Amino acid sequence: MKIPISENTITHNILDSCTEINLRGNIQIHSVFLGQSEKVATGYYSILSQEEKNRAEKFKLDEVKFRWIVTRGLLRVLLANYIECDPGEIEFRNNKYGKPLVNSPLLDSRISFNLSHSSNVAVYVFTQNKYVGIDVEMINEIPNLKDVIDLCFHEEEKKWFSNVPLNKRNEIFYKIWTSKEAYIKAIGKGFSFSPDKICLDQDSNGGMSFKEIIGDQDFKKWKLLSFKPHSHFISSIVVDGDDLITEYYSINPQFIIDRDIPISEKINSPSAIRNPF
């Protein structure tokens, strides 16, 4: 089913209603619940490129299609808010490993971004003059957990993970997994970089840090932050930098059809993400 497009869905004046967001050298994380209506998806569809629209039409299930459209459209809106341009003017390209980049003279080259989505949650991270990556995963039972660990964990990780209490293993596994993915996305190499080259350590408070990254002698520059945008999801970001202030925002996708509400509101806790359901 093709999403209908009409002139009244085209969003030329999005910036007029956006919340003012200024990076100021910080890290800003935006979280959103997906699963929006066709009306909302149509609003975002109207600002996508033709190539993005073609990709959207390849999804067979409407629910999956709408999630992808809203996720991609929100990326355009958020970037446009930072660099003050029309969302439809932004041109994307992927590096050879698939990491999305902006191919546009409109973009201030100092702005770095990354995004991830899992089920009905999407997360975005923005910063300046830094390499950054983000990943989010829904916490599920993994029937072949041992096989995944054998394939993707560093030998040191296997040792300490075996001592994690059974009732905490799933959550700790996803914290490790999202941390590895966030690092791989930050360096922009996709899974051409094997996750078992990354060794994470856990402190007494449950925090993670990099103990070793094979092939990266400067691995100590990478800072890691894990958080829960929702009780059933784990997200991690990796960034090269110190003393950065992290700010969290909750996105309201309904903004595209109701300009009286801000698109993104600052929240005190990453788990305070707006849930429309």
Image: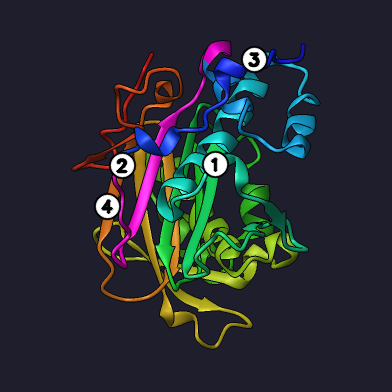
Which element is circle 3 on?
loop
Residue 94 image position (x, y, % from top left) = 72, 57
231 above or below 106? above
- Within 10 Å of disc 3 (Cα), the crowding (few <14, some 14-19, many 20+) is few
Real-space CA distance between mark 3 and mark 2, rounded to the nearest whole angstrom: 31 Å
Q: Which of the two residues, 90 or 167, is positioned nearer the viewer here?
A: 90
Residue 140 image position (x, y, % from top left) = 52, 32
- Residue that carries the numbered disc 1 in the rendered image: 87
Q: Counting residues from the N terminus, which is met first, the one under dot 3 or under dot 2?
A: 3
Residue 241 in which image quadrant: bottom left
Q: Which of the two residues, 24 or 259, is positioned nearer the viewer here?
A: 259
> Which residue is at a point 45% across and 63% down the rendered structure image?
238
All told, the count of numbered labels is 4
Q: Counting residues from the N terminus, which is met first, the one under dot 1 or under dot 2?
A: 1
50 above or below 129? above
Real-space CA distance between mark 2 and mark 4, rounded to the nearest whole angstrom: 7 Å
Mark closer to the observer (1, 2):
1
Residue type at mark 1?
A: Pro
- Residue that carries the numbered disc 4 in the rendered image: 247
